[in-house]
Amino acid sequence: MNKWLAFVLFVVAVGSVVFHFVSPWWFTPLASNWGHIDTTIVITFWITGVAFVAVILFMAYCVLKFRHKADRRAAYEPENKKLEIWLTVVTTVGVIGMLAPGLIVWNQYVHVPDGADEIEVMGQQWTWSYRLPGADGVLGKTDVRNITSDNPFGIAMNDPNGVDDVLIEGDDLHLPIDRPVKVLLRSIDVLHDFYVPHFRAKMDLVPGLVSYFWMTPTRTGSFEILCAELCGTGHHIMRGTVVVDAADDYDAWLQEQETFADYLAAAEAAKTSTARLALDNEEAEPKAAQ
Ligand SMILES: [Cu+2]
């Protein structure tokens, strides 16, 4: 029985390592500058992998070596200074090895390089919308209290920087290749999490504040956006697409997008036509009564 248990433990240890190397599940091909994030995960795999194999093989060894024998008695050894020091040092080195690279990369992840473009991602149950700064390169100020159907991002009416902001609702986000971009994140209802696996980029959207990270797309193509925070019954449909374009394609796409000024003009036109319709009806009614 003990031999079998030791054998099963051995198979678990070796099988896990083999499966790790032949597994079809691995990172999606990288499409941003965040190769360092992959490195930190690989370091964690190595440290936890070595610890896992060591612990499982040690268990298999103990199950065999110290199995029950009628004439054997257990020894009581409450203290072993040497072993405790040794285990504490190895564990400390392992934990530092896992935490330190993460802290270094996190520091890079939230320190935006000078000259990065700014864009805004807005999450709400259960869609993604995007705002780009327009020709002036500056996003207009916003406030949730300004949000209406004509002003879905709540742009401040008295901020001239907001008028040319490009608004994208229910469509793909496009980004130019090889340009660092600061991604500002807002939510207008609950917690969401903007996640593009190919970019290795992920950040919570928290109602009431603007969170951010930065990255540089390094490859053209279409990449999936996921919400990585359980945000209600429609969480699973909260997906989107980000398309990384060459500079010319990006400019051509940008030309076709609507600005906040277009939104305001459309709202104004709708108001006028409603008013005219009401006026027409009023004029028509007395005739109908005759
Ligand atoms: Cu969500």
Image (cartoon, grey):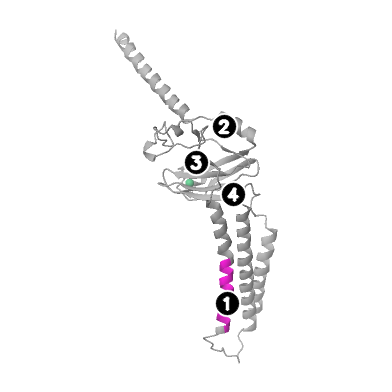
**Residue 220 x, y percent position in the rendering:** 65, 40
The residue under the point 55% across, 76% down is 88
The residue under the point 57% across, 75% down is 89
Q: How far apart are labels 2 and 3 at the CA level?
A: 15 Å
Query: Is 91 within the magenta?
Result: yes
Mark number for residue 197? 4
Amino acid type at mark 2: Leu
Write down the residue under mark 1: 87
Query: Is 171 within the magenta?
Result: no
Amino acid type at mark 1: Leu
Counting residues from the start of the chain, the first of labels 2 and 3 encountered is 3
**Residue 34 x, y percent position in the rendering:** 61, 51
Dominant SS of magenta comes to helix
Question: What span is colored magenta in the figure?
Answer: 82-96
SS for dot 1: helix
Q: How far apart are labels 1 and 3 at the CA level?
A: 48 Å
Question: Do callouts 1 and 2 mark residues in contact (Cβ within 8 Å)?
Answer: no
**Of discs 4 and 1, which sits in the foreground?**
1
Question: Do callouts 4 and 2 mark residues in contact (Cβ within 8 Å)?
Answer: no
| Image quarter of residue 163 | top left
Counting residues from the start of the chain, the first of labels 4 and 1 encountered is 1
SS for dot 3: strand
SS for dot 2: helix
Mark number for residue 177? none
The residue under the point 54% across, 30% down is 257
Task: Indicate whether 75 appears above or below 228.
Answer: below
**Of discs 1 and 3, which sits in the foreground?**
3
Left or right: 173 in relation to 156? right
Write down the residue under mark 2: 254
Amino acid type at mark 4: Pro
Q: How far apart are labels 3 and 4 at the CA level?
A: 19 Å
Q: Give the crowd class for mark 2: few <14, some 14-19, many >=20 residues within 10 Å.
A: some
